[in-house]
Image (tube, rainbow, N blue to C red):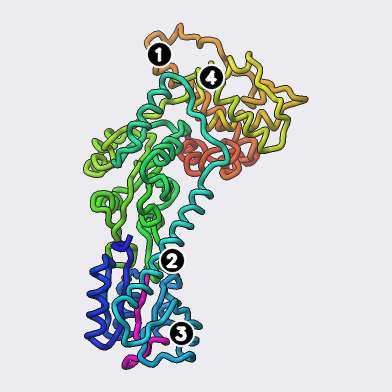
Amino acid sequence: MREHFRILVVDDEVSIRKRCIRLLSRQGYQVMGASDSTAALDLIEKKGHLFDLLLVDIRMPGMDGITLMGKVKTVSPALEIIIMTGYATVETAVKAMKYGAYDYLSKPFDADELLHVVDKVHEKKTLQEEIEDLRNQLKDSRERSFVFGSSVAMNRVMNAIEKIAPIDCNLLIYGESGTGKELAAKAIHDRSGRRAKPFVVADCAALSAGILESELFGHVKGAFTGAHTDRKGFFEKAHRGTLFLDEVSEIPMDLQGKLLRAVQEQTVVRLGSVEPVKVDVRIIAATNRDLEKRVKENAFRPDLFFRLNVVALTMPPLRERCEDIPVLAAHFLKYYTARLNLDQRLRIPDEILNMMCAYDWPGNVRELENAVQRAAVLADNGTIRIDHILPSGPMKTGFPDVQGDQGITFQEMRRNMVDDFTRQYLARCLALNEGNITKTAQAMNMRRTSLQRLMKQFGMSGKSFKSL
């Protein structure tokens, strides 16, 4: 879209500069002007203005257009340049192309010539962005399709997704870790009018505040140590598409204000810049926490909560839809036997499926997927045993002894049992991996940051398992 295509016209002749700005602005382009190379560099390098195209006169007082091209290309290698000259020769053209010019215009040129060459650059940039979008979609897409299930709970979710997807509003997805919040967000994106544009994932819990700010909003060259080039943030990468803010509750308070402005005004400012950049982004946020409670605790801004919580969707935990477990298990087994080149005749016996349905699955679908993958790898002579699904052996399927706990509610008892299992399972995995956090996270099929939060919750340290 032309309103997002930014052009800088550099010419010491006021009449030509103003004429170019007027003609291009009428076509919907964003256009600024500079009277010489020094002023242009100041806009690009020092003040952090972001441009897609540079129209520059080749002969100007002080620094000429060719020298300016060389300096600009070191700052913004992707910036396209068109040379304007009243001294067009083959030698000039060759030199301009050598320094990276897209084309050149011989003065005097008419409006049609100017618009034709600028439109060609715009078409090229648009095509490059579309190709990049397709590459990102291909990179981000999973090799398998996700099966949500056919339970009453998941049918409600799917009906909600079908209804919400075409409506271009922000959305907040609640659910425990591993329930499929990101996959639900992707399903909404794929059914929306933005499906041909990027679906960008921002893991808000995995990054420190400083890095997260740069990742979300981008930065310009020199904004901080190590910022050697301009870089788009997640908001700009998701332009005309969907930005998924995973674990949005973990964003620090001091960054929530800037996020609110971006969500509210659809405008971002890169780190180190003062130039606002318009974006068109649908926000889907997700959390495994009670955000309303976080608001009451002054840990989350109420205005940001209301901006994100236009529509809410809750992903049910796997223990509340156990009828989906056989379908999901069969799906994962088929996927991993094919992917890992294993015996595709493998089946999970009914008695094991029954035990799996009686298990709480605190890690939800992610834990189930990991368990089935492990079982496919460990199966002996085409036989899957319960200890392949749960490494410690058969799970307890009987009721706990509650004679001394009659004052405890069902929900409290279940929570206690889930906590006991999680503590034991976590300790077992840490022991098997000798306290190595990265290896344990991979074995449990969870993010390293999520594992660290779980360890903190149960008062565990990797060092305690080094000698086990």
Reading the chain from its start, which is encountered first: label 3 or label 2?
A: 3
Reading the chain from its start, which is encountered first: label 3 or label 4?
A: 3
- Which stretch did the figure color magenta? 52-66
Q: Nearer the viewer, mark 3 or mark 4?
A: 3
Query: What amino acid is labelled 3 in the image?
Result: Ala
Residue 359's disc is 4
Q: Residue at (40%, 41%) from the top-left corner?
A: 189
Reading the chain from its start, which is encountered first: label 1 or label 3?
A: 3
The residue lying toward the viewer, choosing from 379 and 77, is 77
Q: Secondary structure at mark 3?
A: helix
Reading the chain from its start, which is encountered first: label 2 or label 1?
A: 2
Residue 124's disc is 2
Quadrant in which residue 305 is drawn: top left
How many other residues sit within 10 Å of disc 4, few (<14), some (14-19) or many (≥20)?
some
Q: Secondary structure at mark 2?
A: helix
In the rendered image, which residue does mark 1 sit on?
410
User: From where the camera sits, is residue 52 visible?
Assistant: yes
Q: Residue at (68%, 30%) from the top-left corner?
A: 376
